[in-house]
Amino acid sequence: MPTVGRVVHVGSPARLSYADLQVCIEPKGKPEARVPVEDLAVLICDFAPITVSVPLLAALTEGGVALVICGQRHLPEGLLLPMAGAALHTRVLRDQIGATEPRRKRIWQSIVTAKIAAQASVLAQRTGADHGLRALSRRVGSGDPENLEGRAARTYFPALFGSGFTRSPDRPGVNAMLNYGYAIVRAATARAVVGAGLHPALGVHHRNQYDAHALADDAMEPLRPLVDARVAEMVGSAPPPEQLSVELRARLLDLLNAEVRLGASRLPLFSALEQYAANLRECLAGEDRKLRCPVP
């Protein structure tokens, strides 16, 4: 799996096939374009008459490329990933299944602490005050028994987007923009989780039986403020757009080219996610007690 890969978005009628170790993109009425599979990290097929060959699907999974399928609202609806992402997949899976409850609670504590601290930083940058979230982040206990994550959200979203804002995945405007950004970051996180040999359905906190990517949903939490900050910057003081235009989706998709902080270093998002997923694997196996989370 490449450490830093390209993100390719196909949003118009096209035929996608595989030849000479490359993705062949044949847009309707336009010249063919080719991208080496080894250069790719994420391939996004937006809602359009797009056909994808089975040999290409096999090559993408073998190459560790995340294939994202967007629906009619241009929001990601499906994600294709390899079934096994590491040579020691079986051993890693046993460690993941056998992770003790205290171990999972410590991991969730680290994730929530990092998320609330990142939200505090976003608020401080956007509004000039952290609204008490930095102090709240220092109070998170093992497993977050007080649900400080939820308490932080009730302060955070109105402070960032206005007192009348309510976070609701079904609403248009800012909520739709957040949905798209979160889904893109989720896909990149799921790719890293699978690449580390972990099973994405076995979460440490999210455990919905219908969620095939519960571990990615856990792991991406500290990176949600990355999306929030971008959306707040895009909206500014203007009324939020009713539709997710091509330009808006492109700016949100560019989040995958962002740099994030991991410990004392700033790294490209894909590099940070791969290190993060490897660290998460070690924590689940009990080889490391400290989870280091990437944050904006």
Image (tube, rainbow, N blue to C red):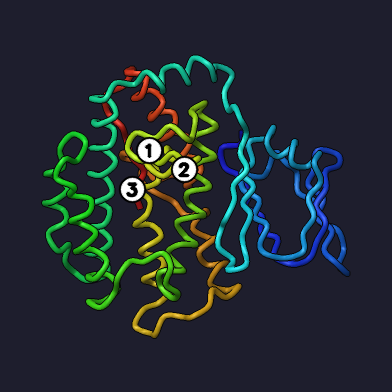
Image position, residue 225 (x, y; %): 34, 57
Label 3: which residue? 222
Mark closer to the observer (2, 3): 2
Q: How far apart are marks 3 and 1 (CA)?
A: 18 Å
The reply to whether the C-beta atoms of the residues labelled 2 and 3 are less than 8 Å apart is no
* Nearer-N-terminus badge (2/3): 2
The dot on residue 211 is: 2
Mark closer to the observer (3, 1): 1
Q: Is residue 150 above or below residue 124?
A: above
Residue for point 38% across, 38% down: 207
Three-letter code, disc 1: Arg
Three-letter code, disc 2: Asp
Q: Which type of secondary structure does the marked residue at label 1 adopt? A: loop
Label 1: which residue? 207
For residue 272, say whether it is visible.
no
Q: Distance between the residues labelled 2 and 3?
A: 19 Å
Residue placed farthest to the front in the image?
Answer: 209
Q: In this view, does 85 lie above or below 212?
A: above
* Nearer-N-terminus badge (3/1): 1
In the displayed structure image, the side of residue 174 where residue 73 appears, left or right: right
